[in-house]
Amino acid sequence: MINFWGYSISETRSINYDTNDKSMTEYIARVVPSSKLCIGCGGCTAGCTAGNLTNFNIRKIQMLMKRGENKEAKEQLQKCMLCGKCMLVCPRGVETRKMILEMLNYIKTKLKS
Amino acid sequence: MAKVIIIGGGPAGCEAAHQLANQGIDVELVEKNNETGGNLNNWYQLFPDRKSAKDLNDILKQNLNHPKIQLHLGMEPRKIEKNKEGKFLVPLSDGSLLEGDSLLISTGFKIFDARRKEEYGYGIYENVITSVELENMFYNHSIQMVNGNTPKRIGIIHCVGSRDEKVCNYHCSKLCCITGVKQAIELRELLPDTEIFCFYMDMRMFGPGYEEMYREAQEKYNIKFVRGRLSEAAENLNKQLQIKVEDTLVGKPLRMTLDMMILLVGMESSEGSRQMADTLGLNLAPNGFIKSQDPHYRNNNTNVEGVFVAGCGSAPMNLTDTLADARSAAMSIMEYIKRI
């Protein structure tokens, strides 16, 4: 946010898919193919312990990651306690815990900036 | 000998004719085009088993080679009358007159005219096509942009002309969701390196094997599904399409460039269905389709005694349901004929 003489310019909230970095989603799709099966039902988030105590939302974070919005994923993922309750509830059999671990792994080793 | 006049030679009309003829009833089948099959003639492969549309069409056509069936191709009914004896008099466009004990209306549906959704750019931007035109491309095994390039990113837009008050259609056309999934898979088979998106409001996978096909599209064919309705498309200098949707599962507006956009056009009541309703005094449902007398038990009956309806004249239906509805209509007609 740029601030000059009391005025500021808001950054766009809009996702620009053309320019976003899709390397993380390509990596996750490859190493955790079941992650592609998400239908956005929110079962994972409803039962999530971290999500009940903080604004952590695993359903939303992986969706953002799929659109190349990696910043929020990077900021939020540390809140996950890897309990795996999300995996028990998922109706599509997404290996959510593995997906989170691989996202953390990618952020630590490969993600630019 | 009892005689039934069937108006409309699409899958419903053909199947009903075949079933009635097999029961010893004389059938006059009237079709305005020069061949039977109706909208099925515009399709390449069917969901969910990817059967060739032509194969099914051929079976339906062969079944019409029956001594009890008289085919009237390229004919349209004029003003229909019911006389004092309860017989239906149907004058045809060639001047001949048919007389029958019962009428079956199988006048089907028409495809939504995508130009009415002007903000999507059909007929304005060259790389916006309909799902029907895509079937034709599949038939020729070639998916190209107008400039001859292979599209690198394709967007499939659900609910075009359906569930949209802005085009006066509240109803769901029911088939577009699964058609979108089927077409996305067919696109993937022809274009292994193209990014393929479906933009949907809800995925309505109502039939056997449909949800499984959706799942396969995601996992095996890497089709990406974004929940959000397209607000508008614009063309850039490269004739690509810049689209705006909200990714509602993320809660943010989303912009992207597509090389090709496919509109899953919905179904509306056909001109033929409306003409029949007009000439016979049939009740229409609020969505413009012919109203059944009862949605459960008398779904092939109309408000006019002796007039029956089968197939997409009464509601959007897939082929499975259309053919089953035609058989059900044939049964209802036989019951009626026994009674009179």
Image (cartoon, rainbow, N blue to C red):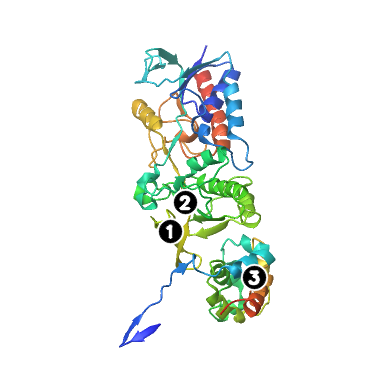
* Sequence-wise first label, 1 or 2: 1
The chain letter for the residue carrying disc 1 is B
**Type of amino acid under label 3:** Cys
Give the label on residue B243, or none: 1
Q: Label 3 belongs to which residue?
A: A86
Q: Position of residue A32 (x, y in %)?
A: 68, 66
The chain letter for the residue carrying disc 2 is B
Within 10 angstroms of label 2, few (less than 14), some, or many (20 or more) residues?
many
Q: Quadrant of residue A2?
A: bottom left
Q: Label 2 belongs to which residue?
A: B261
Image vertical order of residue B47 relative to residue B10, above or below? below
Within 10 angstroms of label 1, few (less than 14), some, or many (20 or more) residues?
some
**Type of amino acid under label 1:** Ile
Q: Are marks 1 and 2 in contact (CB under 8 Å)?
A: yes
Cα separation, mark 1 vs mark 2, equals 9 Å
The answer to whether one can see residue B298 in this image is no
Q: Nearer the viewer, mark 2 or mark 3?
A: 2
Helix, strand or loop at mark 2: strand
Cα separation, mark 2 vs mark 3, equals 35 Å
Residue placed most toward the observer, B278 or A97: A97
